[in-house]
């Protein structure tokens, strides 16, 4: 299967990015043909400072490699290195109904708050469709918030195929049920825009502080509690072993515990889990030439794949 996904370099990656998406990239890379990219063109809809964007792209590459993305197995590249995708985006824009985009949440949320929404944000899902269709992707591992965009991609591919013949492969979203919507420190979906994130890398002391500030309810300590409805437990189970999960689940049902104790357990489990990646990241930071080489090789391979699809599409619409 061809597996493809992208991630925006709009800040440092957080636990939601990892458990919802990046972990899937890594889990699927051995048995499948993975194409993973850093979506810098999409990031331009929010990051308008060139140096900041460049820094985030570099961090994104380091983070993905440190977390276990293996360039011997998967293809890692930067979106803007593949101009064929932007060309395909235009072809998909012709014939894309306005109503389809008006319903998309990223644009709708911004417009409903009276915030300035530019054409880039409006057409964002079409560029994402081009990203997916340009590589004949079968599976797209993402968190729940991207499922709507993949539906848009499928709609565009379906109507394009109906008009011009079977040019596009129909992709499917792949989500992990227990991690499709990782909660943030306030219990809402973890997101850079809500300032409720827990970072994958960064100062461990700061991370511990943020974990200790995770919101909890005010029920008395002695009450028994249902762990399945508690966002602190949802976070803990992402890092803990089956045995540890069972132990903490029993503590919840029994009652008579403090949330502070669970937070400490979470901080310890996260620290142990992330430690190997932290070490790998330090090594990679000292080898920028190697990182650059991986991205260049990835781009060359991705360009070839996207070029073939683009030619097929151009021919189908009468451009060649
Ligand atoms: P982005 O950069 O916002 O997020 C990257 C990935 O992280 C997932 N994610 C989460 N998963 C679970 N719980 C959360 N709290 C959470 N927060 C983020 C996202 O679902 C995503 O999978 N438009 C995309 C980037 C993109 C793309 C593509 C993805 C561009 N082209 C083509 C797939 C295919 C985005 O903004 O993701």
Image (cartoon, helix red, strand yellow):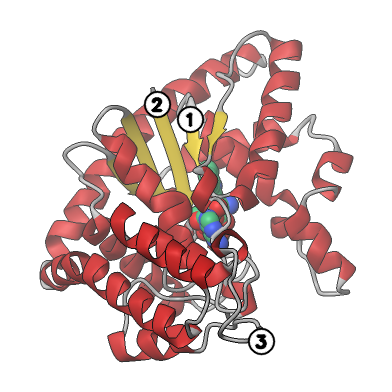
Residue on which disc 2 sits: 2
Mark nearest the camera among 3 and 1 is 3
Q: Quadrant of the N terminus?
A: top left
Say what secondary structure mark 1 lies in. Answer: strand
Does the CB distance between marks 3 and 2 fall below 8 Å?
A: no
Q: Where does label 3 land, which residue?
A: 218
Q: Residue 122's quadrant in the figure?
A: bottom right
> Residue 48 occupies which quadrant of the picture?
bottom right
**Residue linked to disc 1:** 139
Name the residue located 65 percent from the left edge and 82 percent from the top edge: 217
The outermost residue toward the top is 165
Task: Locate residue 305, reporting x and y percent.
Answer: 38, 27
Relative to 274, 236 lies left or right: right
Report the front residue among 246 and 186: 246
Which residue is painted at 51% across and 89% down in the image?
213
Q: Are marks 1 and 2 in contact (CB under 8 Å)?
A: yes
């Amino acid at each position: 299967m061809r597996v493809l996904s992208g991630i925006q370099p709009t800040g440092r990656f957080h636990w939601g990015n990892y458990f919802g998406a990046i972990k899937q990239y890594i889990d699927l890379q051995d048995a499948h043909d993975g194409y993973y990219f850093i979506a810098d063109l999409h990031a331009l809809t929010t990051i308008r400072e060139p140096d900041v964007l460049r820094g985030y792209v570099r961090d994104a590459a380091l983070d993905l490699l440190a977390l276990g993305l293996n360039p011997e197995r998967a293809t890692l590249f930067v979106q803007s290195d593949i101009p064929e995708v932007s060309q395909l985006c235009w072809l998909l824009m012709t014939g894309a109904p306005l109503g389809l985009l008006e319903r998309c949440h990223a644009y709708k949320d911004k417009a409903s708050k009276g915030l300035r929404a530019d054409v880039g944000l409006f057409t964002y899902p079409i560029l994402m469709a081009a990203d997916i269709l340009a590589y004949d992707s079968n599976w797209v591992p993402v968190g729940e918030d991207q499922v709507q965009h993949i539906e848009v991609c499928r709609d565009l591919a379906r109507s394009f195929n109906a008009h011009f013949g079977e040019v596009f492969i129909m992709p499917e979203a792949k989500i992990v049920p227990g991690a499709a919507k990782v909660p943030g420190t306030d219990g809402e979906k973890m997101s850079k825009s809500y300032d409720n994130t827990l970072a994958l890398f960064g100062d461990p002391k700061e991370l511990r502080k943020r974990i200790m500030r995770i919101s909890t309810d005010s029920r008395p300590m002695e009450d028994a509690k249902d762990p399945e409805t508690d966002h602190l437990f949802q976070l803990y189970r992402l890092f803990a072993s089956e045995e540890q999960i069972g132990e903490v689940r029993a503590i919840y049902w029994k009652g008579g515990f403090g949330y502070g104790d669970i937070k400490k357990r979470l901080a310890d489990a996260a620290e142990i889990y992330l430690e190997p990646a932290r070490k790998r990241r330090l090594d990679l930071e000292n080898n920028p030439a190697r990182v650059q080489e991986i991205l260049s090789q990835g781009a060359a391979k991705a360009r070839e794949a996207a070029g073939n699809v683009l030619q097929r599409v151009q021919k189908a619409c009468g451009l060649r």
